[in-house]
């Protein structure tokens, strides 16, 4: 003989409530897919948040561009500094070379200037103070 299970009223209510929650869940998913839940009111409520995100994106992009511009400027200034330092070293060594007595003599001879090297050592002049 077949036995039948006797359901209590509480069991039946639980079963029906489970069916309803499953239907609600499936309805939520269907509504989201059909875009029935997205209304203009909900979109309008999100506008300040979207504007904040847009503003942050603009600030981020601007900050990145400024950073890259500064990096390029720093690299350019380093290159210029190295070039100027090399020019300084070259110029100072050239000045040292041209300042030598032998180089000055060669230069005077090539330009045929009427200058002669002093053979007499310099004399120290002393001035006596007078009481006036």
Image: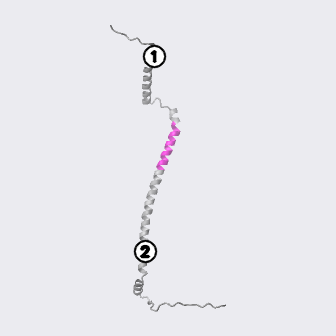
Looking at the picture, tell me which residue is in the foreground, 126 or 99. Answer: 126
In the rendered image, residue 13 lying in the magenta stretch gets the answer no
Q: Which residue is mark 2?
A: 91
Looking at the picture, tell me which residue is in the foreground, 6 or 100. Answer: 6
**Label 1 SS:** helix
Q: Quadrant of the N terminus?
A: top left
In the rendered image, residue 53 lying in the magenta stretch gets the answer yes
Residue at the right extreme of this rendering: 132
Earlier-in-chain disc, 1 versus 2: 1
**Label 2 SS:** helix
| Residue occupying the point 43% across, 61% down | 76
Residue at the bottom extreme of this rendering: 120
Q: Main secondary structure of the magenta part?
A: helix
Q: Image quarter for residue 35?
A: top left
Instruction: Report the mark closest to the observer, 1 or 2.
Output: 1
| Residue occupying the point 48% across, 45% down | 57
Residue 94 vertical position relative to residue 15 in the rendered view, above or below: below
**Callout 2: few (<14), some (14-19), or many (20+) C-alpha neighbours within 10 Å?**
few
Q: Which disc, if any, is residue 52? A: none
Q: Which residue is mark 1?
A: 13
In the rendered image, residue 6, in percent from the top left (x then y), is placed at 40, 11
Q: Which residues are magenta?
A: 46-62
């Amino acid at each position: 003989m077949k036995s039948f299970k006797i359901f209590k009223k509480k069991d039946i209510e639980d079963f029906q409530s489970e069916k309803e929650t499953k239907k609600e869940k499936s309805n939520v998913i269907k509504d989201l897919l059909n875009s029935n839940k997205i209304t203009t009111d909900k979109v309008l409520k999100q506008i300040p948040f979207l504007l904040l995100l847009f503003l942050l994106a603009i600030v981020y992009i601007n900050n990145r561009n400024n950073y890259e511009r500064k990096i390029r400027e720093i690299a350019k200034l380093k290159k210029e500094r190295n070039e100027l330092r090399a020019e300084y070293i070259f110029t100072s060594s050239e000045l040292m070379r041209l300042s030598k007595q032998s180089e000055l003599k060669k230069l005077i001879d090539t330009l045929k200037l009427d200058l002669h090297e002093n053979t007499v050592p310099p004399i120290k002049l002393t001035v006596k103070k007078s009481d006036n």
